[in-house]
Image (spheres, rainbow, N blue to C red):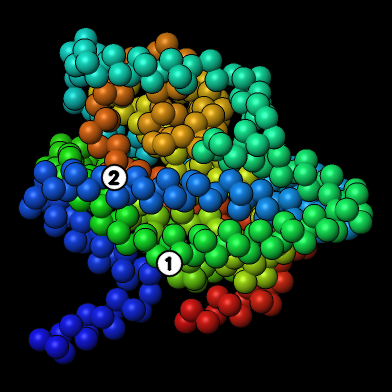
Amino acid sequence: MKLSFAFAFSFLKRGLYVQVICAVILGIGVGYLWPALGTELKPLGDAFIKLVKMMLAPLVFCTIAGGIASLNERRGIARTLLKAMAIFYLLTLLALLLGWLAAAIMQPGAGWHFHPAAADQNVMLAMSTLSSTTENQGLARFVLHIIPATYVGAFAEPEVLPVLLLALLTGFAMARTRQAGDRMLTVVDELSRLCFSIFGSIMKLAPIAAFASMAYTVGRHGIQSIAGFSYLILNFYLACAVFVVVILGGLARLHGFSLWKLLRYIREELFVVLGTSSSEPVLPPLMQKLQALGCKKDVAGLVLPMAYSFNLDGTAIYLTLASLFIAQACDIPLSNGQILGLIATMLLTSKGAAGVSGSGFVALVATLTVIPDLPLAGATLLLGIDRFMSEARALTSTISNVVVCLVVAMWEGACDRQTLKQQLDQQD
């Protein structure tokens, strides 16, 4: 008995990712055997996400502001931003097209014959409330939403974009005021180290959050709830896998590094994302690992937080796949022109829901409110299984964000390729 406990203890000490795997397995077991208990564990997972969001704004602010203030050539910031936005939208477009292709080939909604009038009225009331908060997400409204009401107001909201704007302005101001800026830079750097230290302590709670989240998901919805949607879920996971292997893998190979070795390098963070269905908890450790791979601090600190709002490729695949699933399930034929219009709308709505809990489903509702061809009631089909698809959304977006950050750093000459190669080769 003592030997078995010693073995289990040494196994758990191997790394955070092993602990998360064990927690996920235990969570599934508890949710399946004791669904009522599993449902009651939800606050543990929610508490972890709230702790993460509590520290996210100050950490992103310090990292970006400090990185910009330490640059000698600030013209490079605009160039980096433009290059980052260009690749963000290119990958988002490819992800949207891939979701369309997957739905067209696999036909996950064929044969459902769902009538929107049959949707539960209570659910539709909730959907209408949700749609009222996501409609009219035009470009002007989206840009205005980025600007916080006050300087400190950006830190009170669980969104990255207002903090990013504030950090950019503060970093440039610190860089212009030399002597005072140097003093402020020292303060910001020390505060950044403090935030990373606090985040490191919070991350130790990730296995508990993974356990609680999986127990709640299985206990609340039941494993059997995915049986009827297994083909759709499989279709989505395959589309995400193709995007990662073919598109991101090709992008990595084109720039001289191995995607497989990179995935092994960030495996701990990926298991945390898998267990919590959220990419936010791994933003700080990913920034540290990118710097360890040879990326300059200012580029990694600028591009990665931006990617969290503008490069939601997992969500993009979900949007087109889910929308076409609804069209097929409701027996609504869509022309290629209508589908292209749908994709054009999604290029905006996939960004507008950034930072919102359950952003994939929120973005879907936002899309359906402005597309008259598809009924909003069709989204009720996906309510029960959205949680089972969120893991793939978060994982795909996280992997894409890391790859993009490395690529942009290489474009800017801000990545030591020798260090990158040495660090990734150590994974063999």
**Nearest to N terminus: mark 2 or mark 1:** 2
**Percent coordinates x, y for residue 402 in the rendering:** 56, 57
**Percent coordinates x, y for residue 308 in the rendering:** 55, 45
According to the picture, the residue beneath numbered tag 1 turns out to be 267
Q: Above or below — where is 177 with respect to 363? A: below
In the image, what residue occupies the spot 18% across and 13% down? 118
Q: Please tell me how crowded label 2 is: few (under 14), some (14-19), or many (20+) other residues with Cα within 10 Å.
A: some
Q: Could you say which disc has been placed on residue 32 in the image? A: none
Q: Quadrant of residue 137?
A: top right
Q: Please tell me whether mark 2 sits on a helix, a strand or a loop.
A: helix
How many badges with numbers are in the image? Answer: 2
Along the line of sight, which residue is nearer the eye, 411 or 219? 219
Q: Please tell me how crowded label 1 is: few (under 14), some (14-19), or many (20+) other residues with Cα within 10 Å.
A: some
Q: Above or below — where is 197 with respect to 155? A: below
**Percent coordinates x, y for residue 354 in the rendering:** 52, 36
In the image, what residue occupies the spot 52% across and 82% down? 426
Please state if 164 lies on the left or on the right of 29 as rendered. Answer: right
Please state if 272 lies on the left or on the right of 181 as rendered. Answer: left
Q: Above or below — where is 161 with respect to 23? A: above
One can see residue 234 in this view: no
Q: Please tell me whether mark 1 sits on a helix, a strand or a loop.
A: helix
According to the picture, the residue beneath numbered tag 2 turns out to be 43
**Percent coordinates x, y for residue 370 in the rendering:** 47, 15
- Please state which amino acid type lies under the numbered disc 2: Pro
One can see residue 144 in this view: yes
In the image, what residue occupies the spot 43% across and 15% down? 132
